Amino acid sequence: MPIISYKEAAKRAIVEEMRADPRVFVMGQDVQSGLYADMVREFGDERIRNTPISETGFYGAGIGAALTGMRPVVEAAFSTFFYSAMDQIANQAAKSRYMFGGQACVPLVIRAHVAYSMAFAAHHSDRPWGLFAQVPGLKIIVPTTPYDVKGLLTSAIRDGNPVLCFDDFTLFGSTGEVPESDYTIPLGMADIKRAGSDLTIVALAAAVNHSLAAAQLLAGEGISVEVVDVRSVVPLDRQTIVESVVKTGRLIVVDAAPGTCSVASEISATVGETAFRHLKVPIRRLTAPDVPVPFSPALERLMYPTTQRIVAAAREVVVGRGYA
Amino acid sequence: MISNESGAVTTERAGPGKRSLSNDELHEMLRRMLRIRLFEERASAMMSKSQLPGVLHNSIGQEAEIVGACMALRDGDYMTGNHRSHGHPIGKGVRLGPLMAELFGKSTGVCRGKGGSMHLADFSSGSLGESGIVGSLMPIAVGAGLSAHLRGTDQVCLCFFGDGAANCGPFHESLNLAAVWKLPVVFVCENNGYAIHSPQQQTTSIAQIARRADAYGIPGITVDGQDVLEVYESVSCSAADARAGRGPTFVEARTYRYCEHSESGGPPRPPPYRSEAEIAAWRCKDPIEKFVGRLQRIGALSAQQFESIRSSVQEEVEAAVRFAEQSPMPDASELLENVFV
């Protein structure tokens, strides 16, 4: 099976859908000279469409095109640019189907880079998957591996709903096996990336890789860790998460976003509500603090869960005091 | 605008949109204007007795620009509205029953009771929806135009918005995007002079909003929005240009709403921001009276025909109210339906 990068796998998903379905097109700022430069010749500048720096304008145009029979993929560059078009995402894309009584269908994908831990400072570094999960009507995917991003993005483009895809920029260069053949990963299915019996770690984006590294280290100490990759924030695969915790009796949730009202909060609440009696120790959340992202690398490196922090938390949860 | 010997009305302006209107078409214009007025008067009366939930934004006084623009479209064309938007689907020919039922929050409403007064939509008639957020559907209209362009159809999207929207970001982004991509969109600015309660001169840097079109390199025209034929002619020409690939046009229709910005249950409040004399002066230029008078002068409408149209519309409105009243409220199961496809 060919080994390709995350970035290439994501692009391959979109290009293959464009070949298969004339309704699919890409628009965004500088797409003709950036990610899709080598695709303009095949698809033309109508379907690889450069936009002005005009988020409200071209996100809204994506919604309008989706409402009238097209399947746009909007390349949004940074996730924080979503805020410039918040009305289009939260009021229009998300609500049109419900508010118009099921008449509307918004098959739209909006992709954004989540570029934290790169000294891009506060205006380019947010991880807002939890923020948008508060908006009913949006599906949200956060892939981790090349295999997952290709399968999830393909499903997202074929889906009839608005899907936000948050691409963790730190994963773009990571590589993995991706089949040549057509395949999809259904939205709403978590993935057990490593099986274990003492502790469940639920994570998303690059935190999955940090958790896997931690699990490897902990295995040497005799601690068996199960790592669940969320993959899809909306819909959230609560069943897989709860079943894992029922098995292990311990849960750490790792999320690089700020902790308050976060995906980590939602997962913790779900387990607390449905699997409380199976918990041997309290749930732990490893998240970013509730602060904007600082510029200085000396400060930013304190922000996010790392392999070392996950290992330390796991030791406390598994061999520590338990219920105090 | 002139009348020919047979009494039909022909547009003066030469152009691809130029065509004669038959008496039947003129009567249909009148019928739709009356539908809007009587529908909204009835809704307003019910709201004042707290018989409707929520809030209404009525467009009584603006019927000519709505119907003139809507009737310039073809059946397969698209349209986006705003918060003051009962008239837009009515102008496009949507049946009154499901619209009225929507104001009641009933399951037979055009949006199954999920949208209400500010969010009417009828996709089967090309109405892509309305919005409680000023200016927010302008980019979506551009997207409908982009879709028509990419699919190679000659569909046009008519984008309604008010003078208040002309000062918000989506307005500028949408005009630029539609212009730079030469998309088939007709922007119709329903300039009723007030952004909620603030007069235009307080909020807008220029008096003639259509001049802003020049900044985006597209034609901008200001028309008498109380003259249904002038609006029809202008939007017809703009739509024809759009279909021919000549890009978007900006039509500013000068109009006026007689009623308050919004109405909810309880007695109406006096308008401290505008004078009774101003309202009275605009009522003297009432778009329906003006159109009826004109049709009668050219012999295109007898008193008997007018009465017949008026009473049939009155009956349509009453039938719509009966339909709404007799319809069931949405079942509890509807609450969770249609979040996703």
Image (tube, rainbow, N blue to C red):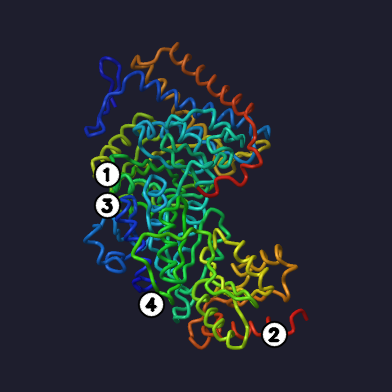
Return the mark for residue B217. 3
Nearer to me, A184 or A103: A184
Which residue type carries mark 2?
Val
Task: Name the subunit of mark 3.
Answer: B
Q: Residue at x 34, y 70 (%)?
A: A8
Q: Residues within 10 Å of mark 3 (few under 14, many from 20)?
A: some
Q: Are marks 2 and 1 in contact (CB under 8 Å)?
A: no
Q: CA distance from mark 2 to mark 1?
A: 66 Å
Task: Give the secondary structure at mark 1.
Answer: loop
Q: Are marks 2 and 3 in contact (CB under 8 Å)?
A: no
Q: Are marks 3 and 1 in contact (CB under 8 Å)?
A: no
Return the mark for residue A173. 4
Q: Mark 4 vs mark 1: give the one in front.
A: 4
In this picture, residue A199 sits left or right of residue A193 = right
Q: Mark 2 vs mark 3: give the one in front.
A: 2
Task: Name the subunit of mark 1.
Answer: B
Nearer to me, B284 or B253: B253
Reply above or below: A294 against A240: below
**Residue A165 appears in the picture as rendered:** yes
Residue topped by disc 2: A319
Nearer to me, A152 or B280: A152
Which residue type carries mark 1?
Gly
Q: x and y percent of residue B191 in the render?
A: 43, 42
Return the mark for residue B152. 1
Which residue type carries mark 4?
Gly
Task: Give the secondary structure at mark 3.
Answer: loop
Q: CA distance from mark 2 to mark 3?
A: 70 Å
Could you tell me which quadrant the C terminus of chain A lies in?
A: bottom right
Q: Are marks 4 and 1 in contact (CB under 8 Å)?
A: no
Q: Residues within 10 Å of mark 1 (few under 14, many from 20)?
A: few
Q: CA distance from mark 4 to mark 1?
A: 39 Å
Q: Earlier in the sequence, mark 3 or mark 1?
A: 1
